[in-house]
Image (tube, rainbow, N blue to C red):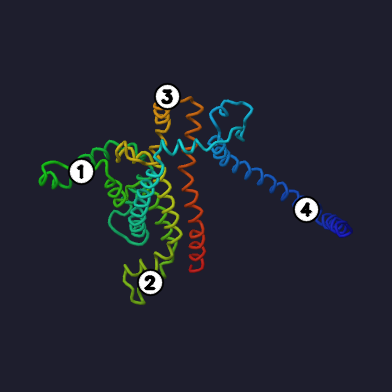
Amino acid sequence: MNNKKNKFKTFIERNKKSNGYLLRKVSFNVFYKIIRAVLLFGLCFMILQPLLNKVSLSFMEEQDLYDSTIVAIPRHFTLDNYKIAGYLMKYWQSLLNTGLISLMVSVLQIISCVLVGYGFARYKFPLKGLWFGAVILVILVPPSTIQSSLYLNFAYFDIFGIFSLITGKPLNLLGTITPYALMCLGCMGLKSGLYIYMIRQFFRGIPKELEEAAYVDGCGKVATFVRIMLPDAKPIITSCFLFAFVWQWTDSFYSNLFLKSDFAILSTKLANIAGALDSYLDVRGIAKKATTAYSQGMIATGTLMVIIPLIFIYLFAQKGFVESLSQSGIKM
């Protein structure tokens, strides 16, 4: 108690000597911390509240959805929503298909975008500014504006008329994963322009002396890129890989455009879950059409089942991302 009194007297004396500056500084720091805490709480609440609301709805029976006295905690707890949503979405098959396509797309995008981004950052070539402007257009132009062109290009795919000459007609690549691979290798995949820009900016920040030292030691351009530049680029490669994987995981635009309607993908199955629920109830003679509240509850359950694997992937990859970032800082 005496110690606190002594500290208070010391503070008063120091404040008098500073003509009140110390009190104003301490008051400002306290006010700043309070405002920061309120803003952080509000931001976290805005992000987590819809997710927590979906978690609550996923465990409610249908009668709880119409009970105005229930806010967040279900009165009749059930796991049937997850069973029904899993059946409607063909969950395990869709999960496997989505994982394989997302992994393939992410790997191909990273390979092509790293090569292109490194080229833009380190080499000079004709019309470099024009080509980089095209990369910016890939970022700015929505994919929906070229939807018709993409559909016709892959529905009647041909290279200089070679396939028409051999088989008599062009190839129809729709309904396969080939369009994904071709677009990713051509740096026209989902968000490829953004990844090229990010990787280019990262490589531009690496001192050129590292490459020059490697050249002096006898490394060629390829060996320097593989042995020197790629290890330093692990943080940005990890980030772009995670972005590519997550965006492809939740993408429905390219999935609806390239794949067959009956192909099991989580994003498309989630978008059609309300219609599938009506058919499910009609077959079982429960009802002809699901109520709006029950459909929304099932959509909330399906949404959670889609994002749960992403949460585990992030938790698994976060450690590697932090480690690669710290190692890159030590090397630099």
Residue 290's spot in the image, x, y percent?
Answer: 46, 25
Q: Which of marks 1 and 3 is nearer the N terminus?
A: 1
Q: Residues within 10 Å of mark 4 (few under 14, many from 20)?
A: few
Instruction: Please name which of the two marks, 3 or 2, marks the residue nearer to the observer.
Output: 3
Up the image or down, 41 lies above or below 240; here it is above
Instruction: Please name which of the two marks, 1 or 3, marks the residue nearer to the observer.
Output: 3
Residue type for callout 3: Gly
Q: Mark 1 points at which residue?
A: 157
Q: Mark 4 points at which residue?
A: 21
Pick the residue in front: 323 or 297: 297
Helix, strand or loop at label 2? It is: helix
Residue type for callout 4: Tyr
Q: Which of marks 1 and 4 is nearer the N terminus?
A: 4
Up the image or down, 125 lies above or below 279; here it is below
Q: Which residue is drawn at 39% across and 74% down?
A: 213
Q: Which residue is drawn at 82% across and 55% down?
A: 15
Relative to 73, 144 lies left or right: left
Q: In which quarter of the image is the N terminus?
A: bottom right
Q: How crowded is mark 3: few (under 14 residues within 10 Å), some or many (20 or more)?
A: few
Q: Earlier in the sequence, mark 1 or mark 2?
A: 1
- From mark 3 to mark 2, how far is it between C-alphas? 74 Å
Image quarter of residue 257: top left
Residue 190's spot in the image, x, y percent?
Answer: 36, 46
